[in-house]
């Protein structure tokens, strides 16, 4: 059975970004509100921590092929390219790059998460109610 949880990061007066976490995979769909504030990274970090707690061993996502900023963030969290979904996005039929992060259950991955979180906490603050 699929187990799902939604996370939302918001700034005052903003709908913000949303992420859906699933037991066997995680899928990130940030809205196109404000870029480079760190909200997307907070959601990715929290979903990775949540996925690890749930016993997930790998995560996947799709990202627009034109969204190089997001791709750089995902690679920082060990996501690697694994394929293309042609004409994936219904608004403009842009292709999606499929990315996977493997072995998220390993201690090395957990250590990287802690380092990323420590750096991110120097930039922004957030509250997690998980």
Image (cartoon, helix red, strand yellow):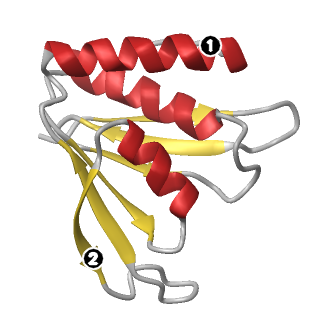
Residue at x-position 38% and y-position 74%: 96
> Which residue is disc 1 drawn over?
121
Q: Is 52 or 78 nearer to us in this picture?
A: 78
* In the depicted structure, whether residue 99 falls above or below residue 64: above
Q: Is residue 98 left or right of residue 69?
A: left
Residue at x-position 39% and y-position 88%: 87
Q: What residue occupies the far right of the structure in this picture?
A: 13
Q: Is 121 or 86 nearer to us in this picture?
A: 121
Disc assigned to residue 76: none
> Which residue is disc 2 drawn over?
84
Could you say which quadrant of the image residue 38 lies in? Answer: top right
SS state under label 1: helix
Residue at x-position 79% and y-position 32%: 11
Q: Position of residue 31 (x, y in %)?
A: 63, 55
SS state under label 2: strand
Query: Callout 2 environment at 10 Å: few (<14), some (14 to 19), or many (20+)?
Result: some
The mark that comes first in sequence, 1 or 2, is 2
């Amino acid at each position: 059975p699929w187990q799902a949880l939604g996370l939302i990061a918001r700034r005052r007066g903003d709908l913000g970004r949303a992420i859906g976490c699933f037991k066997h995979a995680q899928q990130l769909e940030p809205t196109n509100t404000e870029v480079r504030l760190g909200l997307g990274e907070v959601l990715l970090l929290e979903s990775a921590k949540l996925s690890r707690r749930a016993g997930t061993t790998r995560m996947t996502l799709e990202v627009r092929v034109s969204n190089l900023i997001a791709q750089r963030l995902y690679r920082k969290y060990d996501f690697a390219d694994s394929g293309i979904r042609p004409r994936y996005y219904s608004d403009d039929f842009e292709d999606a790059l499929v990315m996977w992060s493997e072995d998220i259950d390993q201690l090395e991955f957990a250590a990287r998460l802690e380092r990323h979180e420590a750096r991110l906490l120097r930039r922004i603050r957030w509250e997690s109610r998980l």
